[in-house]
Each structure stands twice: as structure tokens, then as C-alpha cells.
């Protein structure tokens, strides 16, 4: 799943993490015969597009300077249809990049493609794991070209937009926790206006912004690379993309690692998945606050969980009464504090900024939580990421259109899980008034020819709760699940954990999987 501003219009920076979404081809209201016809047309279209891409290849060049990708990384483009049912219609170009395998020619096993999550995350920085000497990936880099791409609608690949980027990031936003019916009406109005803005600015692309279409794009990229079969690592939402790809193209998969798994059940995509996050975020927030209390000698925020929680409530109330620096209210605080339940690497930085505030210096909190209106490129990327997140989730599956259901479900959850519930609701509410038809989610399953898939999951992951990995494991027969016990960071295959790292290496380098599912001890705990 993708970590982003906690509220529709809440907070500045967005961090790619992961979510999930997917849909096959036809609108939910279509008859079965119409769906079959749509799937057949799209299957023909993707085969045609892949054949054309295989013949054309990719014209690799030095990357444009403003892409921030150093040599020897190279960049190129792959042409795909906007609508696979009409492969001779309008096309867009998908941005791709690569760095060659670092080993000998005899060691090389092909290309390894990567998606970091979202929906809305860019994978173009994946080859930088070689240029920056990321030690977890050193062995795999000897065998594979590392290939990244911007999915359709993202970044360099025909980017979509819903609102002016500066207005999108500007704060302070409304407090996501409503005090009255009037507060709820104001948030509902913002959500409806956002949906309208997406349609006005990007309406031509919206019907085609689905996970199945991104999976089809992935197959065209595979063909353009000259690869007979796909090697793929997907994190967070990237696991759903991988699951949908494996369902649509089971015979095209060679090796697939899915890390921090979106629950692929059609009942979960996407409305229920977001409700499940609200519960899991509360649990992981408790883990972090317990750690803060254990390190009270460093942070001075309380020596018990209850004391630390009261400090949060006090900070939140103060920012609601008078936004910090005129920019940081409760919405912006949630956007920043949310990164701690997401990633263990953020436990200490968030606690440090909070500790400085408690000691009388609010500036670190303001600097981290407020939008930087001078960061034009960053704000464009944030707005684009949110637009893609919304477009894909809204199109992938039907959403409730009854406000009573949203209100009832989120009011009930908020009573027990107050940290993220309303913020998450407002971020997703545009799907209740989305202007293009939704699709039926893909029924993720094992198709003939699908090889064993490796699944990695932390037990206490907040963004993609553990149940999702169990569900995918059931659906992909022959898969293996590695559980990182008593851990909850999101995206664990890039963390240093020799137990996990060695198993991922063995699978990607030799196809070897353990005979049974495995449990690894947690990676090293954060240091204060």
C-alpha cells in the first residue's frame, strides 16, 4: 500500500509503501458474456502489443539529467495501448530504466523488474541499488539486470493529475477527526470536488487506470526487454500487481518475490483493505510508542505507554488549537507520525522531532510535517502519486456509494482505532462519487504453469496486515511464506536480516525454496 498524506487534502510529503487493488476488464454491471468478450479482446490486445514491443526493443540511452539517475543507468521507453481492447487506438509511453548485471556473462540470468508499491509509486530508482552499493542486493545484482519503470499514469509515464500540486500540499488541512456533522459535510464536499477534479483533468485515462492494465503493461515491458519470462519483485501494492500478473500470465512467470502483501481477496479490494489498515496501524503505533517509553532517558516523552499516548493527545490538541508555525495541524501531524508505524527506520527520527517539541523547540516537527511550497518537483510528484493511488483503487473494484455505510463503519472503527481511521476514510472517499465505472476485481488464483512464488511478510505490518500474505499463500499453490516474527516494518526484503536475505537470494539465484514455510527472527530493533 502507499503511504501518503493522511487526509485527502492533509499534509505534504508522501512516502511509497504499499496497498493493493485490482480488477479484470469489464465494469461491475456488465453481463458475464460481456466480461468474457472484454477479457478476450484484452488478451488479444496484450499479445499484439507484446509482439510489437519484442520486435521494437528498447532504445537505451543515457538518462535525462533531471531524472536524477547516474551513469551507467540507462533509460528508455516502451509503447503500450491505453486500452488493450483497442490495441490500434491511442498509445502512451512507459518510462523504463536499467543497469546491467554486475557478474560475469555466465552468471547472468536476465532482467529483474521491480515495483515499490502505491498505487502511484515509481520504480525508476531500483537500479540505484547497484550504484549505491545496497549490500542486501549485491548477490542478486550479479545475476540480473535491475529494471525499474514508472507505471501508467505515474511520473514520466503519461502522468495524471487531479488538482493543482501547490494547493494539494498546502496546509493546514481540516482535522480529519470530525467534531460535528458539519465537519463531515465539509470533508465530503472536499472528496467530491477531488473526484470531479480528477475527471476534469485526467478523464480520458481514468477508465484505464487499473491494476490489470498495469499488469498487461508489465508483460509488454517483459517482451520489449527480450525476456521470455518475467522475474519480478513487488513490494506492498506491488504484491497485488504481481498477484494479478501471475493470474493473467501464469506461464510468463519465472521467479516472483512478493513482499508485504495486499490481501488479494475480492472481498477485500479495496474498501475492506483500508478498514483493515486502520486496525493494524493502531497496533503498530502502540509498538512504536512502547519503544519510545522504553527509551524515555533519550526522548523524555513518558516512561509508560499511557504517558506517551497522553503526550500525543496533548500535541494533537495543541496543533488543532493553533497550528504549529501556522502550517502543521492534526492532519499534517498524522501524515508525519504515520511514517513510524510504516517503517522501523522512522522510529527514531519521528521520536527525535517530537522530543524537541516537548522540550520547547517546535521547528523540527514543523520542518518534517509541513509542506515545502518551494519544492515544485516534489509537490508535483506528491499530487501525481495521490492521483494514481485514487484512480487505480477507484477503478479496480466497486466502492460503497452510501455515505451512511462509510459513516457507520468509520465511526465504529474510530472508537477503538482512532489514529488513522478518519484520515484514511477521507483519503478514499472520492471513490464514492467517482466519475467512471469501476470493474470487478480479479479473482487471484493459480493458473496452469505458474511456478512457485516466494512471499515475505512481517507479522505486525500496519500497511498490509499479515492476513493478506496468508490469503495469497493459499491462492498461489506451491508458494512459500517467510514470516518475520515479532516485526512490523513494511517492505522487509531490503532490510538486513540474514535469515530472510539468504532465502530471497537462494530463490532468485537458483529457484530454491524451503520444503516448508519458514519463520525468521526479527531484524535488529531500531536504536534511539
Image (tube, rainbow, N blue to C red):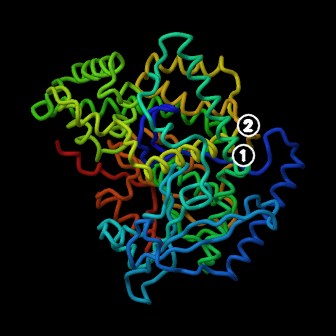
SS category of the residue bearing label 1: loop
Q: Is residue 470 visible?
A: no
* Left or right of residue 479, residue 285 in this image: left
Q: In the picture provided, is 226 more to the left or to the right than 420?
A: right
Residue 407 visible in rendering: yes
Q: Position of residue 395 (x, y in %)?
A: 69, 43
Tell me which residue sits at (55%, 49%) in the image: 119
Quadrant of the image occupied by residue 339 = top left
Q: Residue furthest front?
A: 374
| Front one among 285 and 437 | 437
Contact (Cβ within 8 Å) of mark 1 with mark 2: yes
Q: Quadrant of residue 101?
A: bottom left
Residue 120 or 319: which is nearer the viewer?
A: 319
Q: Which residue is painted at 61% across and 65% down in the image?
A: 94
Residue at the disc numbered 2: 435
- 119 and 219: which one is in front? 119
* Disc 1: CA contacts within 10 A as few (<14), some (14-19) or many (>=20): some
The quadrant in which the C terminus is found is top left
Residue 511 tag number: none
Disc 1: which residue: 203
Amino acid at each position: 500500500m502507499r503511504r501518503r498524506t493522511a487526509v485527502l487534502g492533509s499534509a505534504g510529503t508522501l512516502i511509497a509503501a504499499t496497498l493493493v487493488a485490482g480488477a479484470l476488464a469489464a465494469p461491475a454491471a456488465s453481463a458475464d458474456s460481456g466480461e468474457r468478450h472484454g477479457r478476450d479482446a484484452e488478451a488479444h490486445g496484450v499479445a499484439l502489443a507484446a509482439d510489437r514491443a519484442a520486435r521494437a526493443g528498447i532504445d537505451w540511452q543515457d538518462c535525462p539529467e533531471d531524472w536524477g539517475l547516474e551513469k551507467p543507468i540507462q533509460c528508455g521507453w516502451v509503447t503500450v495501448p491505453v486500452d488493450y481492447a483497442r490495441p490500434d487506438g491511442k498509445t502512451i509511453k512507459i518510462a523504463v530504466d536499467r543497469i546491467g548485471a554486475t557478474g560475469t556473462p555466465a552468471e547472468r540470468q536476465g532482467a529483474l523488474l521491480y515495483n515499490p508499491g502505491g498505487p502511484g509509486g515509481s520504480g525508476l530508482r531500483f537500479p540505484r541499488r547497484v550504484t549505491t552499493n545496497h549490500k542486501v542486493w549485491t548477490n542478486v545484482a550479479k545475476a540480473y539486470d535491475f529494471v525499474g519503470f514508472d507505471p501508467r499514469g505515474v511520473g514520466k509515464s503519461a502522468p495524471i493529475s487531479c488538482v493543482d500540486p501547490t494547493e494539494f500540499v498546502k496546509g493546514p488541512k481540516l482535522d480529519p477527526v470530525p467534531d460535528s456533522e458539519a465537519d463531515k459535510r465539509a470533508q465530503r464536499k472536499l472528496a467530491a470536488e477531488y473526484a470531479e477534479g480528477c475527471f476534469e483533468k485526467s478523464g480520458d485515462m481514468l477508465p484505464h487506470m487499473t491494476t490489470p492494465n498495469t499488469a498487461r503493461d508489465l508483460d509488454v515491458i517483459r517482451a520489449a526487454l527480450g525476456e521470455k519470462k518475467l522475474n519480478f519483485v513487488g513490494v506492498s501494492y506491488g504484491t497485488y500487481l504481481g498477484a494479478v500478473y501471475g493470474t493473467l500470465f501464469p506461464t510468463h512467470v519465472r521467479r516472483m518475490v512478493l513482499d508485504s502483501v495486499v490481501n488479494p481477496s475480492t472481498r477485500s479490494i479495496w474498501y475492506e483493505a483500508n478498514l483493515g489498515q486502520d486496525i493494524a496501524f493502531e497496533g503498530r503505533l502502540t509498538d512504536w510508542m512502547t519503544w519510545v517509553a522504553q527509551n524515555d532517558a533519550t526522548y523524555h516523552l513518558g516512561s509508560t505507554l499511557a504517558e506517551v499516548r497522553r503526550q500525543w493527545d496533548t500535541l494533537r490538541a495543541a496543533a488543532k488549537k493553533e497550528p504549529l508555525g501556522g502550517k502543521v495541524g492534526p492532519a499534517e501531524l498524522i501524515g508525519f507520525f504515520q511514517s513510524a508505524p510504516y517503517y522501523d527506520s522512522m522510529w527514531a527520527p519521528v521520536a527525535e522531532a517530537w522530543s524537541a517539541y516537548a522540550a520547547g523547540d517546535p521547528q523540527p516537527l514543523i520542518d518534517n510535517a509541513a509542506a515545502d511550497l518551494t519544492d515544485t518537483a516534489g509537490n508535483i510528484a506528491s499530487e501525481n502519486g495521490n492521483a494514481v493511488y485514487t484512480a487505480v483503487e477507484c477503478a479496480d473494484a466497486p466502492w460503497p456509494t452510501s455515505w451512511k455505510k462509510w459513516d457507520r463503519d468509520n465511526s465504529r472503527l474510530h472508537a477503538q482505532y482512532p489514529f488513522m481511521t478518519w484520515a484514511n476514510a477521507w483519503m478514499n472517499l472520492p471513490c464514492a462519487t467517482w466519475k467512471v465505472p469501476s470493474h470487478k476485481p480479479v479473482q487471484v488464483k493459480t493458473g496452469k504453469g505458474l511456478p512457485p512464488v516466494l512471499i515475505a511478510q512481517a507479522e505486525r505490518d500496519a500497511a498490509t496486515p499479515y492476513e493478506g500474505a496468508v490469503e495469497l499463500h493459499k491462492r498461489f499453490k506451491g508458494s512459500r511464506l517467510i514470516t518475520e516474527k515479532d516485526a512490523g516494518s513494511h517492505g522487509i526484503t531490503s532490510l538486513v536480516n540474514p535469515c530472510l536475505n539468504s532465502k530471497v537470494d537462494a530463490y532468485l539465484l537458483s529457484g530454491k525454496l524451503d520444503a516448508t514455510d519458514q519463520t525468521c527472527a526479527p531484524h535488529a530493533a531500531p536504536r534511539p
